[in-house]
Image: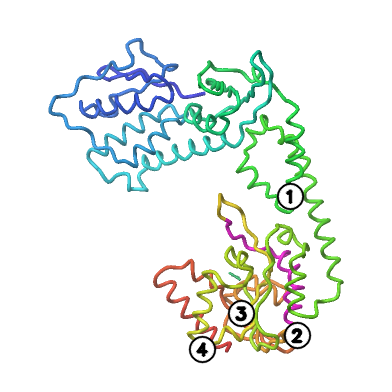
Amino acid sequence: MPAPVPAPAVGSHAVLLTAADDFDGWREAARQAVMAGIPPERIVWTEPDQAPDLFAAPGRGLPVSPNDASRPYVPRAFLDLARMAALHADPQRFAVLYRLLWRFQRSPGLLEDAADPEVRRLHALARAVRRDIHKMRAFVRFRAVTDADGERYVAWFEPGHHILRANAAFFVNRFTAMRWSILTPSGALHWDGACLCEGPPAARGDAPAGDDMEALWRRYYASIFNPARLKVDAMLREMPRKYWRNLPEAALIPALVAGAQAREAAMVDRGKALFDEERPRSLDAIVAQGQTCRRCPIGCNGTRAVAGEGPVGASLMIVGEQPGDVEEQMGRPFVGPAGRLLRAALAEVGIDAGRAYVTNAVKHFKFVPRGKRRLHQSPNAGEIDTCRWWVESERLLVRPRLVLALGASAARAMLGKTVSVQKVRGEPMALDDGSELWITTHPSYLLRLQDEGRALEEERFAADLRKAD
Ligand code: URA
């Protein structure tokens, strides 16, 4: 229930906007109001269904500005943010925008102040609207109906903010060849293949509840559902429950989620049984067999396995965490930014990286998709322990005199237990075959540091490498 908008006090000005998303109306009135010197506390912004005052009317209530009044200063970035924020359901949004516009006249750099509460509120409003626009694009589901003119597709959607008109062009461009209607509690859009028109608010019952396409849609969803990739929190962030009612595939989610853990456990059990298999007899066999490894959920994610690289008999084996985005694409370990840092540090202390065997604790890339990017995710203890079989197989073949483990995942892979890297770094540990294990920090950690902090840690890293050499 939106908070009621207070009636204007005596001496105040009421501006009635023509619609809840009337950004242009607000902009014009706000410009006039600033030019006429009306402070924010003396202006009440009202939407049509809130008008508490009989005298409030579009274009009324604002005095004419003096002839010599200069045009208000409006930062370009503010206009873009304000256009979004104006679509928010918050009844105070237009007042917030006007207060900012008013303050820009005295503080032109205000928008740069990320700590200012009103600037932060502006960003939060715009962000929420952007998200709602995106959700509508993702979650509108059309159902086919037949009317006098033939087939038509109708969808019911409940936006959180006043985004219906702002999204119209998207749906027209996306579904130009279809006849469709999108019904919402605050209005409707109808497209007949040539013209777009608006309709009055609708009710859920005005839209069809299901059609033949839904069975197809559900079958498709069930077939692409990968239990190994299930992250309930991430799924709820992307597809909040409030949209489920209108999504045919959502009916499947509880059952698929409930079955996912069991399916994943069965998959991992099947994989573990494979550990009884004979170990690969060559590094080439490791490269080849690793591609089909499905012993853990990361192995099931469809990425390329990246095995180690270097000569049999190398006296130094370097173990990282897992291939990153670049490594997965190139199929080689440590060829991305962390690899460059590592190789430069090795060169600096006189270690020839080309003579070392370089590998990772985990052979597949674990990530979460974010738009077009794949964001690195650390492997968990179970995944590292499962992949140990491969690193052990590599170590048995290479037989290094010295193993250098970079970071906590690599240390766990070598020791079979978690240790604190900061506590054990820089001291040798004996491995079961008599070789020496040295543990130090991971180069990606250094990449995340800045300035002196980074310089200091790079020094410590180089000192650890020197000791291990
Ligand atoms: N980080 C790692 O741990 N290994 C790589 O191969 C690349 C980045």
Q: Nearer the viewer, residue 192 or 205?
A: 192
Name the residue beneath numbered marker 1: 226
Q: Residue at x 76, y 78 (%)?
A: 393
Which tag, 3 or 2, sits closer to the chain's start?
2
**What is the x, y in percent for residue 257?**
75, 44
Scheme by which the image is coloured? rainbow
Instruction: State the CA–CA distance, disc 1 to disc 2.
Output: 39 Å
Which tag, 4 or 1, sits closer to the chain's start?
1
Which tag, 1 or 3, sits closer to the chain's start?
1
* Element type where label 1 sits in the image: loop
Q: Residues within 10 Å of mark 3 (few under 14, many from 20)?
A: many
Q: Nearer the viewer, mark 1 or mark 2?
A: 1
Q: Confirm or deny contact between disc 2 and disc 4 (CB under 8 A).
A: no
Name the residue beneath numbered marker 2: 432
Q: Amino acid at mark 4?
A: Gly
In the image, residue 307 sits, relative to residue 213, either above or below, namely below
Q: Which mark is residue 148?
A: none
Which tag, 1 or 2, sits closer to the chain's start?
1
Judged by its main secondary structure, the magenta piece is helix
